[in-house]
Amino acid sequence: MTKLGAGIAITGCGSAAPKARLSNDHLSQMVETSDEWISSRTGMKNRHIASWEETLSNISAEAAEAAIAMAGISAAEIDLIILATSTPDDLFGTACQIQNAIGAYKAVAFDLTAACSGFIFALITAAQFIRTGVYQNTLIIGADVLSRWVDWSERSTCVLFGDGAGAVVCQGIQGSDRLLGFEMYSDGSQNNCLNLSYQGQSKPLIEDVTVGSGTYRPITMNGREVYRFAVAKVPEVIEKAMFRANITAEQVDWLLLHQANQRIMDTVAKRLQIPEEKVLSNLAKYGNTSAASIPLVLDEAVRQGKVKPGDIIAASGFGAGLTWGAAIFQWGK
């Protein structure tokens, strides 16, 4: 157990993606579209797609092991695992499978579902366990295999989504806290703008008793409404988190947004007056990987040497629910 009031540091990161790639040109062979149409509207060029043999737990474990190695600890030292996902291998939860796969035998593990906001929500949740002195070493994973739930004949959605996983290790430290500020919001009145809903039919059991029997239908989205929501709410939530962190946009080294659409990221950066060169993006390579997108970008930027210890990062996730949130943190100890 850590000391009550401990600070928080993000000390390791890792990522993983399925082997197969699906390019815009590949998609143009499947639906009526083109590389120019997709890239000009979304900024996407490729996305990684899991085969039937690849599982969410597999790619999550790979990302987790890389993050643990960077943090310089062993899996046996992890106290808590939070898996942010909307596409578990098991509807009862997949975090425990990852716990077993990486050998984190003393860790408690559970799933958290908040769609594309999931990683931010999970990071903030894990931080509270550290701040209250309950746990020392936490592993936060954002992972999704959205290809399972895409209608590959629907042009407006099938071009957007890819599969992947990203992870960070968050540790308790004495001294200054590296999680500088955060905000989270939800608005269920707009749930119909983006969902992956259960669709059942009545199945009689005995007289006067029926149950619903069915499955989840593919992702549906009102792209125009989601765009309006994102460009309005994301700058606002980042500004509120920066206020809590007592910093200004000029002090932000990197803007790290959920990789949903390049137009959204450009508009948010412009409204915050953060220059283009400070916006982290790998959208062209991976597409929208939901809860995985933020830690995927972070891991690449750290390993490329772009993000350095002490850098201030303004991160924001937003998506289905509708949910949105922001976290301002410094990378490293």
Image (spheres, rainbow, N blue to C red):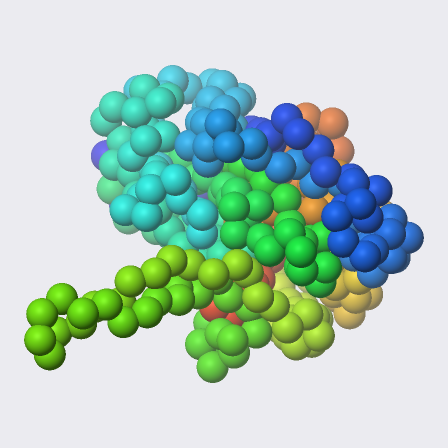
Q: Is residue 126 left or right of residue 120?
A: left
Image x and y of residue 297, in percent: 66, 40
Q: Residue at x 39, y 40 (%)?
A: 89
Q: Residue at x 87, y 52 (%)?
A: 34
Q: Residue furthest bottom?
A: 189
Image x and y of residue 228, in percent: 69, 76
Residue 165, visible in the rendered structure: yes
Image position of 121 with respect to 17: above or below: below
Q: Residue at x 49, y 49 (%)?
A: 119
Q: Nearer the viewer, residue 266 or 330?
A: 266
Image x and y of residue 33, in percent: 83, 55
Q: Residue furthest right?
A: 36
Quadrant of residue 106 within the rendered picture: top left
Q: Nearer the viewer, residue 280 or 20?
A: 20
Image x and y of residue 56, in percent: 46, 36
Quadrant of residue 100 within the rendered picture: top left
Q: Is residue 122 left or right of residue 181?
A: left
